[in-house]
Structures are given as structure tokens and as C-alpha cells.
Image (cartoon, grey):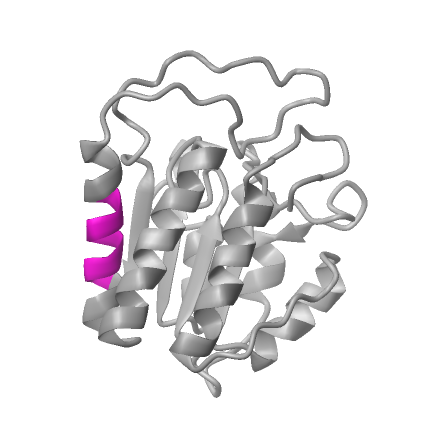
Amino acid sequence: MRNTPGSGKLPYAEDEVNIVKQMCPKLDLKPGTPRPLKEGVLASLEACNVFHFAGHGRLNAAEPSKSCLCLEDWETNPLTVQDIRGKNLESTQPFLAYLSACRTGTNMESRLSDEGIHLVGAFHLTGFRHVIGTLWEVSDKHCVDVAEAFYETLRDEGMTDLSVCKGLHRALRNLRDKGRAKSKYIRDITAVGEEEDQPDLGNTNWMPYVHFGC
């Protein structure tokens, strides 16, 4: 989502989605783009094999079950960890959820740190075989690079457990080897009007990514 209510813009998110769409026919997938509202996205999970989200993530440090993916209606009807965990997709066993947003694999509540109560854990628990997410802020621009390299591996080597692991590894290694880069936009919640350049992250843009699955 390029534009999210109450949040900073993500000018590269649309590029990322377009790259994924272009890859779909080569992965024997039919792309679908439901309107980014909670109920529609939840319903779409029941028929998808790959779910890719590019946008803002919001971490609720006090109540991790309320951490959410920020859709158009996130301020009034957020798509939370609890909502995802309420689905049961074991019968369809979707292959991959790729959560290209900030802090989707993070739980800041120390008393629940070993419970896996975060968005990545929720998608995995509900039935997705593989889930890719992040532990902290990610660069909007570099999210595109990671996603493109990742799906290129799936295109070239097939949608297998091994190709998911290899694809993420290659994508992050490529990004790491590009060296230092300054990030202007991040996929965490920022107020509109607070989109100034972020501090130089050094060569750490590759580090936040995590993979849950086989």
C-alpha cells in the first residue's frame, strides 16, 4: 500500500506489488488484489496459495495480539494478530505468506516473549507453510530488492521448501553486498508530515528479515 490513512507514504510499495504480479504467471499463480479492507483480506486468505503484503505494520508493545497490518480501515477495524489466529487454513495449506512491513515478527511484551504472538507467528499458526517477515524497521526501497530477488529464485527453481530458504538467503546476501545505503522511507507507522530522511542505517538493511517454516 503506497498510501495508508494516518501514516507516511511508501512510494516503492506499488513497485513491489507490480513485480510480484509479473512473477505470478511464471509461478502458476493467478494474482488477485482485494480492496485493502480487513474483511476482504481475511476472506481472500481462504482461497490463496501465496499472500504478499507490502505496506505498514504496527506493533502493539503492550498487547501483542493487537499488532496489525495497516489496511485502509486499520484505524477503526485493524487486521490483528488475533484476527489471523482466528482463521483455520489447515485444509487448504497455503504455501507462503510474505509480510513486507516493519516488525511483523516482533513481540515486545517480555512476559510473552516465548509465545510467538506476532503477525508472522499468527500466519504460520493458521496454516501457512512458510512465512517471511521482519524483526524491526525495513527500508521501503530495499523491500523491493529483497522481494524481487526472492521471487526470482522461486521462478527459477520452483515453489519448494528449499527454494524459499535459498531465495531469502540470496536476496539478503545480495542486499548485504550492496554496502551502505541511506533509507528515506520505512514501513513502520509514522505520522503524515514526518517523512524526513532516516538516519544512515549502515549496511543493516538486510538484517531484519526472518523466515518461519519448513
Q: Is residue 8 above or below residue 89?
A: above
The answer to whether residue 213 is seen in the rendering is no
Q: Position of residue 69 (x, y in %)?
A: 60, 48
- Left or right of residue 32, residue 95 in this image: left
Q: Position of residue 109 (x, y in %)?
A: 45, 34
Q: Position of residue 128 (x, y in %)?
A: 42, 71
Q: What secondary structure predominates along the stretch shown in magenta? A: helix
Q: Which residues are magenta?
A: 165-172
The answer to whether residue 169 is seen in the rendering is yes
Task: State the residue in front, 84 or 48.
Answer: 48
Q: Based on the displayed image, in which of its 4 quarters is residue 94 positioned?
A: bottom left
**Residue at x 60% of width, y 36% of height:** 11
Q: How many discs appear?
A: 0
Q: Position of residue 119 (x, y in %)?
A: 49, 52
- The quarter in which the C terminus is drawn is bottom left
Q: Is residue 45 above or below residue 175?
A: below
Q: Is residue 43 above or below residue 134?
A: below
